[in-house]
Image: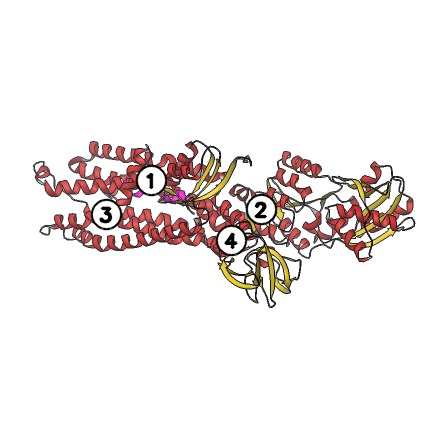
Amino acid sequence: MKLTTPDKTTTIRQTFPVLEMTCGACAVSVESILKKTEGIKDAAVNYANHTALIEYDQKRIQPQAIQQAVRAIGYDLVIDTENAQIIQEEAQHNQYESLKRRTIWSSILSLPVFLIGMFWMDMPYGNYISMVLSAPVVFYFGRSYFVHAYKQASFGKANMDTLVALSTGIAFLFSMFNTFFPEFWHQRGIHPHVYYEAAAVVITFISLGKWLEEKAKSNTSSAIKKLMSLQPKTVRVVKNGLEEEIATSHVMVGNIIIIRPGEKIPLDGIVVEGKSFVDESMISGEPIAVEKYRGEKVFAGTVNQKGNFQFEVQKISSETVLAQIIKMVQQAQGSKAPVQLKADKIASVFVPIVMAISVCTFIIWMMVGGENAFTHALLTSVTVLVIACPCALGLATPTALMVGIGRGAENNILIKDAESLEQAHRISIIALDKTGTITEGKPTVKDIRWLTHSSTQHQSALYSLELKSEHPLAQAIVDNLTRNNISTAPIIEFESITGKGAKAKVAGEVYFVGNQKLMVDNNIVFSAEVNSLSLEWQKKANTIVYFSDSINLLAMVAIEDKIKESSKSAVAELQKMGIEVHLVTGDNAQTAEAVARQVGIQHFQSEMLPADKALYIERLQKSGEIVGMVGDGINDSQALAQANVSMAMGKGSDIAMDTAAMTLLTSDLQSIPKALKLSSRIVQGIHQNLFWAFIYNAIGIPIAAGILYPYNGFLLNPMIAGAAMALSSVSVVSNSLRLKWVRL
């Protein structure tokens, strides 16, 4: 489900752990009550990872009120954001241990009941022994089903607990009546059957299924746990010249932290003393360690190599790059794919439909069942309630998403929402930006050609203008002129001209720096020599920056940005997958053509402003194409927003990463085909899960109702139905877990 864009002034979008959910219908119930609560704009509840992604107006409602709304229907919400993960893990661990104990004790008590019911039905006092042993199984170890069913019923809702409580409760009470009043049936010529073994074993099998399900689900969130383990729990801080070990959560911005060889860096900051190499593969995906010295940035979760250094904290634990990655993965895992919305609608009416089928089954058997009508009616209606569990349906989509998104995070692919993931495998065209996407994004000056006398004033003007600019090409020129010890000059009226360059006044003279469009717009004339040299440089895939005053062209700068080694092979792999690759760039036609030729791209568009890129993608979409856009700069954000699926390179601008549906932490373009393959496998897994969840109920419910009885006399035992129900949930989770080992 795609949540609406929040009003940042009053609206908060936050993930809260949800406790006490036992099935997919529970998630639907919690989501329903949240959406009806005043002040909540939208909510998405994920049964697989027991979280609620809630968008609410903080002026109209506070987390405490949201928690109360959830508690009213029998569930709980963790609102302690600082310790939410710990509280949820403790609750899940306690639930797991509780299920384990209940399953073991239920099994011990149910075994003799099962043996008596199956083999020693006529033993003296057998019914009384079975009743005494099965009562604690049903009403003590299975009490949670009755409690939750009652709370749901008080709000006019029903879930899996309703089915379990009705089926086992009816079977036990009917058996108890037959135990104490057997003559009621004897007088009517009917043998008084008891179903203690069915009630007890159903509770046991359902508890076993839940236990196995919890164990399997804990594996689906392993990627989050791995990411969280990257941040040390304690750090050594320098205070008043002395070292002090404190909890990472207590560190403040400005604290100085000591890092020794082999240690993980706990927070984001800047090196203030020392020198070392740091393994940043977790952030960048690059295997080569990066040298760190005074003034260099370091990031939480990265690993120091051999040297010692100290760094000043710039971001606390909740604001680090690592924290943002974890938050993005959690929100993606908590989001809903469009296919799940259909499953949720089915789950919301599933339990009432099953209850109606159970009642109809009872009535039909009473009408046509002959001398054993009541016995068969009761058995089949109870079996229908037992076998029809919505758990498999509720788990089908979220477990596949959780495992798949976690698998992506392990491969430096961060996915923001499930909707884009579901779309990605349908992409027919990928549009690639050039700088920082196909190329390394580290432009260097190849040549500077001064067309007039290279005066100190002109060089200072060029240096000062580029210092003000944020464009990566400007930085290349600044670096070059810095090495030549060019000094700055005071500038006024600086203006950045989107997609073209910049202008400013230096010492009373107006100067322009940028591309050919900027020169043409300001009537700067190019000589034949300039045109010839431009063409020569562009054929070598160099980008040209022109520098002029208000009348004459003063200089031309050739800037080289090397093509990444992986670009050509990534383009070839995308084309092999049947995807058309387009290059969209603001650079000139000759440079764009040269780059496209080198990496094997047939379609390219040059001299495009940010709005032009978005319009180009819109035109492709109108022709029926599903378009993916990959970029890294602020100028790509409009096109990223327009695309069906958007991917930002992790070393790009914050705006690009905020806009994009996926972020590729590594600069390797091979991540793109990997992301598309992952999308395909996840969607395939979801469809497999949904197929098995639906086919299971489509086949199971009619058999439970006794459809085979007229042909071969077969009636499904409620105990077998309970085992089958448990198996369906475990099989869906197990199928999702296969995504952990899928080859990308």
Residue 300 image-quadrant placement: bottom right
Of the 4 image quadrants, the one containing the C terminus is bottom right
Residue matched to label 4: 407
Which image quarter: residue 75? top left
The residue that disc 3 covers is 140
Mark 3 vs mark 4: in front: 3
Which residues are drawn in magenta?
382-394
In space, the residues marked 3 and 4 are separated at their CA atoms by 40 Å
Are the residues at dot 1 and dot 2 in contact (C-beta closer than 8 Å)? Answer: no
Name which of mark 1 and mark 4 comes first in the sequence.
1
Q: Is residue 33 left or right of residue 451?
A: left
Q: Is residue 500 magenta?
A: no
Query: How far, Cα to Cα, is label 3 from label 1?
Result: 18 Å
Camera-side mark, 1 or 2:
1
- Amino acid of disc 4: Arg
Instruction: Judge by depth and name the residue closer to the eye, 53 or 255.
Output: 255
Which class describes the residues within 10 Å of circle 4: few (<14), some (14-19), or many (20+)? many
The image shows residue 380 at horizontal and vertical percentages of 24, 40
Q: Which amino acid type is shown beneath numbered disc 2?
A: Met
Q: Nearer the viewer, mark 3 or mark 1?
A: 1
Q: CA distance from mark 4 to mark 2?
A: 14 Å
**Residue 726 visible in the snapshot:** yes
Q: Nearer the viewer, residue 462 or 566?
A: 462
Q: Amino acid at mark 3?
A: Tyr
